[in-house]
Image (cartoon, grey):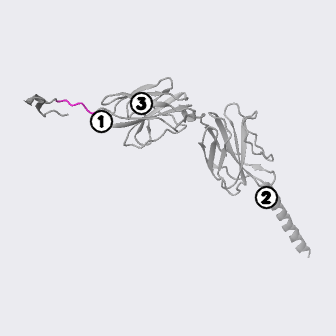
Amino acid sequence: MEMIKSIYKLFSFVALTIISFSAYAQEPTEHVTGLSATVNSDQSITLNWTAAGGANLPSNYLVIAARTTGGTQKTVADGTAIANDTDFSAANFDGALNITFGTNTATFTTLVAGTSYDFKVYSYKTGGTPNPDFKTDGTIPAITASTFVTVPGTQASGLQITAKTETTVDLLWTSGSGAKTLIVARASASANTAPSNGTTYTADPSFGTGTEIGTANYVVFSDVSTTTTTTVTNLTAGVEYVFTAYTFDGATVTSNYKTTTAPTATGYTLATKPTTQITNLGVSGTTSSSISLSWDDDGDG
């Protein structure tokens, strides 16, 4: 009987030890991986990642954010829960989102236009001691992304062809409210592709030389809005071309193009000028009211 009691006590001790250990063994084994950021607009950024794995899975993720300049990210410490915070106007210009394990995305929607933000993603587990228990060792997954600037309110207008030759076209337009204007040229047989926000394009007035957007849409002009004329070169004689103007603000990753109601100008270049003229033009007959002409049709027009 005493032996049975001893065995029972031993098993009870082991069970309590396991339970006690389990209560403290909360920290997730791994961090998330593959953290990426997608800029949605001038106020919104979405983060995506691959779920944390390992023997001890998290119950949640904490995503913290702060402005790169002038912001301070929240301090993460075991035992101290951090509530959701989407008010980036506070003194630290920071925020936080708690995401349930199984969801691998988080979106902040109250950001400031044209501003860079630093993000970190912590794995953590609740229900034990400490509560919550964050994984703070190793390298915390982090990424930096910038919102677009606010899209200009007024689009460029009045785009027109003012002169043309066999290989060139002169363009004139009225600038929109953006600080810069982008003009894209394409042969009419090619489908139109608008510029993408957060992208910088290299312009060249020589058609086919500037950045290609989509298929066969070439940037032929990108400059300040005080310039309202340009000449596009390297065109093919007798071909119809379409030119589209976009007003935009920002630079590099913050660029925001106004793509709605973008003006277009469409026109043919001149056909190739004949090099050989007709010969032997002469009068072949006359009447009281007409003159007949004849010639040798050996020109190449």
Q: Label 2 neighbourhood size at 10 Å, few (<14), some (14-19), many (20+)?
A: few
The location of residue 61, given as percent across then percent down, is 70, 49
The numbered mark at residue 22 is 2
Residue at the far front: name it.
Answer: 288
Quickly name the residue at label 3: 160
Q: Amino acid at mark 1?
A: Gly
- Whether the magenta-drawn stretch holds residue 13 is answered as no
- Give the mark nearer the N terminus: 2 vs 3: 2
Circles 3 and 1 in contact, beta carbons < 8 Å: no
Q: Which residues are magenta?
A: 271-276
- In the displayed structure, 55 sits above or below 256; it is below
Residue at 39% x, 43% y is 190
Q: Quadrant of the N terminus?
A: bottom right
Quickly name the residue at label 1: 238
Give the left or right position of residue 300, taking residue 26 as reference.
left
- Give the mark nearer the N terminus: 3 vs 1: 3
Label 2: element kind: helix
Give the left or right position of residue 172, taking residue 234 as reference.
right
| Pair 2/1: label in front | 1
Separation (CA) of disc 2 from disc 3 = 74 Å
Foreground residue, 256 or 102? 256
Label 1: element kind: loop
